[in-house]
Amino acid sequence: MRQIVLDTETTGLNPRSGDRVIEIGCVELINRRLTGKNFHCYLNPERDSEEGALAVHGLTTEFLRDKPKFAAIVAELRDYISGAEVIIHNAPFDVGFLDAEFKRLELPLFNAQVSGVIDTLVQAKELHPGKRNSLDSLCDRYGVSNAHRTLHGALLDAELLAEVYLAMTRGQNSLSMDLEDDEQADQQGVQTELVALASILVLSASADELAEHELALTALDKEMRGTSIWRMAEN
């Protein structure tokens, strides 16, 4: 499975008012492994960044003046993302800006060029309702070092988001099952499983172990000032 973790930096917050993309950073994952095949470019937006946006990314008009325009890199970008599942934090923001750039060139919109979009902000809100779910907050929560992130940068943020996504979804790939393999296992492995179950040795707890168990449950009941779930499970 090919996935692309994508981030952009922009001149402002609203593509409808003429704000443009000034940086694109992408990180490739194949079967949940980083490949090192990244995509990164700075872009000349042909306008100044708003003061608030400039404070976030630090990419000045002077720095971007000699960088390529979006039209010059669009073919390479489209080839890179083509058919991939794309992972973005707060996807409507980045997709909205990229759609605006594609529209200017009369090209298909972003979603038509990829196999799907995963919004990690939506995922994070489902996993951690009521908590802060910014990229920095998620880095802290999942132990991803972002000490080198003094300003926002598209490639750096994509690399951080890739690590966060892998940590946040760890174990999902082990839940997916091949139905054909399962059916074959059901047909061929039942006898072996029954033999294995029949050979399981059951050891009962000793009197001392039961007494220690009772003391542990009593301590839990005192801490809870009631009946612990483990005590209820015995009934």
Image (cartoon, rainbow, N blue to C red):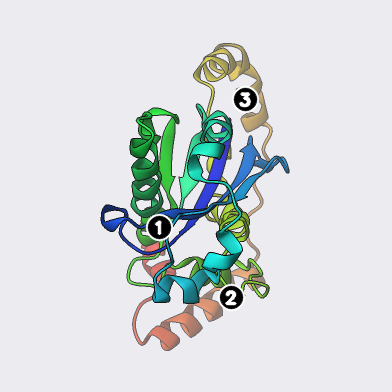
Query: Who is closer to the viewer here, 33 or 27?
Result: 27
Quadrant containing the N terminus is top right
Q: Residue at x 68, y 73 (%)?
A: 148
Q: How packed is label 3: few (under 14 Cα within 10 Å), some, or many (20 or more)?
A: few
Q: Is residue 180 above or below residue 218?
A: above
Q: 209 left or right of 90?
A: right
Q: Are marks 2 and 3 in contact (CB under 8 Å)?
A: no
Which quarter of the picture shows residue 133? bottom left
Quadrant assignment for the C terminus? bottom left
Residue under numbered circle 1: 121
Residue 137 in the image: state x and y as whole percent: 49, 72
User: Disc 2 to disc 3, how far (Cα)?
Assistant: 35 Å
The secondary structure type at the circle numbered 3 is helix
Q: Most extreme residue toward the left, as rendered?
A: 16
Cβ–Cβ under 8 Å for marks 1 and 3: no
Q: Residue furthest right?
A: 36
Q: Which mark is residue 193?
A: 3
Q: Amino acid at mark 1?
A: Leu
Q: Which residue is mark 2?
A: 211
Q: CA distance from mark 1 to mark 2?
A: 49 Å
Circle 1 SS class:
helix
* Residue found 57% across the figure and 17% down from its top: 181
